[in-house]
Image: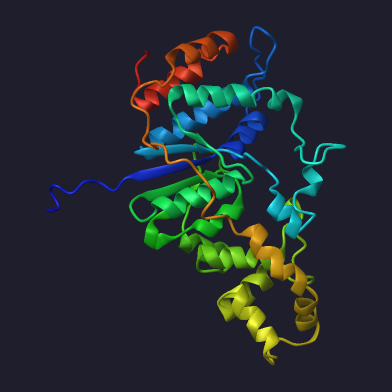
Amino acid sequence: MSAETAQPRPHLLLLDTASLYFRAFFGVKDLREAPDGTPTNATRGLLDMVATLVTRFSPTHLVACWDDDWRPEFRVRAIPTYKAHRLAEGAVDEEQVPAELAVQVPVLRRALEAFGIPVLGSPGYEADDVIGTLTARHKDRMAVSIVTGDRDLFQLIDDAAAVTVVYTARAGVRDAEEIREADLQARYGVATGAQYADMAMLRGDNSDGLPGVKGIGDKTAAQLIATYGSLEGLRRAVADGDPELKGARRANLLAASDYLDVAPLVVTVAPDAPLPDVPLTVPRELADPETLQQLVEAYDLGSPVGRLMKALDLRPG
């Protein structure tokens, strides 16, 4: 096929939906209520974010990835402290979420579905796993942009496959950075997404209840992974008695053996979560205009719905 007739590569935009609606809830100060008293800031904020992202990236494919299970059993079995501090008081598996946000989550999901944006989760898996699975399925034929405020997903960055992370934690959605391998090297001293994951296992993460290895922080973890290539390479060097690994460092790595055995099960996102094979193309017409209109009237969503319709180039049904 000639350069003149070649079609542009499809572009898949994957939304870490909970990351975005939490950001909207805490970032949109206008706590305007619907006529029935329901807060709407997270719903309006999320719809505006999606409109901004669609306008900026012009994706051909779009998915709102969902946490069907925010604390999967297979991860808790491996490391019982995983996300334990986020449990609602007295709950076994319920996440602590502000009541003013919890009431909006079903509304914003219905709005996304009414637009025709696929909302995909997988029983027993987190949204991160949905993102990892969709990335694995489609990166050979599409560029993939992952929108999140969670550094855990840096592990999926892959320049060769055009997989980037649109990182919202620092600058918000409008000015979010696109993180590539060069950024991982510059910021963290690791060359690839896979090395970032290995570094994260070594240093641990208090926000996720991952203990890491005693005495090893970001800088040391990055140096060790850069030197030995991977966590597996580092552990092999420890087992082989590498003379460069001695004293307290060697002792701490050996003491953390049980943790390091299971850390990959927890930190590595699943590439094979069960997901339905549904069309992922950006909607060209509203999937459910009647429901969307009901939501507009019930929750006063006319402005953000209008902005998203314009971004998607949709017309009223």
Q: Is residue 167 visible?
A: no
Could you tell me residue 310's position as x and y percent? 38, 22
Residue at the image point whose x is 65% and y is 29% from the top: 25
13 or 239, which is in the foreground? 239
Q: Is residue 16 visible?
A: yes
Position of residue 45 in the picture relative to residue 261 (left or right):
left
Residue 172, above or below 154:
above
Residue 105, above or below 195:
above
The colour scheme of the drawn protein is: rainbow
**Quadrant that contains the C terminus:** top left
Could you tell me residue 260's position as x and y percent? 71, 70
Could you tell me residue 305's position as x and y percent? 47, 19
**Can you name the residue that lies furthest to the right here?**
90
Residue at the image point whose x is 61% and y is 31% from the top: 24
Residue 110, above or below 60:
above
Q: Tell me how many marks there are.
A: 0
Could you tell me residue 212's position as x and y percent? 74, 65
296 or 57, which is in the foreground? 296
Residue at the image point whose x is 39% and y is 54% from the top: 139
